Image: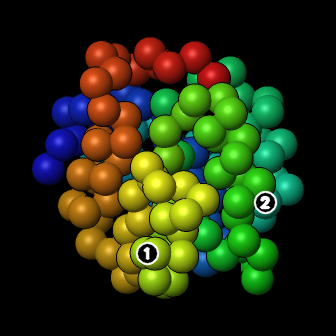
Amino acid sequence: MKSSVLRGRRILIVEDEYLIAMSLQENLELAGCVVVGPVPSIEKAVKLIESESQLDAAVVDVNLGGKLAYPVADILQARNIPFVFTSGYEDNLLRTRYPQVKNCSKPYLFPNMEDALADAIGGKTGPHSNPG
């Protein structure tokens, strides 16, 4: 586990399934993260991203209420905020548009999500080192 890399990081959760969002929030907080959200829709996620001055990373469910979360991913990329997808879709469906973004296939184990987030954050040295 790479929780030391995540400690103190502000992580946005974009997930429309309540139980998954709550479980992820709890596990991220136990890993020392500050959770932003969770938010269940593209619209709410976009508003939150635009209003937050500090986001270190995000976890984005690909399918939010039947809509693909590409607008959320595009804004995160434009702001240079690393993120990880969660999805029940095959990984190759996301590869063309977002080749560098990891997809944690649902159902995922939290240690796998933790590792994917730590890898997405990469060499950033401390909390809030990536101005939003």
Residue 102: which quarter of the image?
Answer: bottom left
Residue under the image location 79 percent in, 33 percent down? 50
Query: Looking at the image, is mark 1 or mark 2 nearer the viewer?
Result: 1
Residue 95, compared with residue 12, is above or below; it is below
Which structural element holds mark 2?
Answer: helix
Q: Is residue 114 left or right of residue 53?
A: left
Q: Nearer the viewer, residue 8 or 118?
A: 118
Tell me residue 43's x, y (percent): 85, 56
Tell me, for residue 91, which label it has, or none: 1
Quarter occupied by residue 110: bottom left
Mark positioned earlier in the residue sequence (1 or 2): 2
> Can you see residue 99?
yes
Q: Is residue 114 above or below residue 121?
A: below
Within 10 Å of disc 1 (Cα), the crowding (few <14, some 14-19, many 20+) is: some
Quadrant where the image shows the C terminus: top right
Q: Of all residues shown, which one is farthest toward the left? A: 1
* Image side of residue 73 versus residue 30, left or right: right
Look at 14% across and 50% down and name the residue there.
Answer: 1
Above or below, 105 relative to 37: below
Please tell me how many numbered marks the rendered image carries: 2
Residue placed under numbered mark 2 in the picture: 42
Amino acid at circle 2: Ile
Q: What residue do we see at 66% from left, 76% from top?
A: 63
| Residue drawn 54% across the image and 76% down it | 93
Q: Label 1 amino acid? A: Asp
Is disc 1 in contact with disc 2, using a CB cutoff of under 8 Å?
Answer: no
Residue at the far front in the pictured view: 96
Q: Residues within 10 Å of mark 2 (few under 14, many from 20)?
A: many
SS at circle 1: loop
Residue 26 appearing in the image: no
Q: Nearer the viewer, residue 90 or 63?
A: 90
CA–CA distance in space, label 1 to label 2: 21 Å
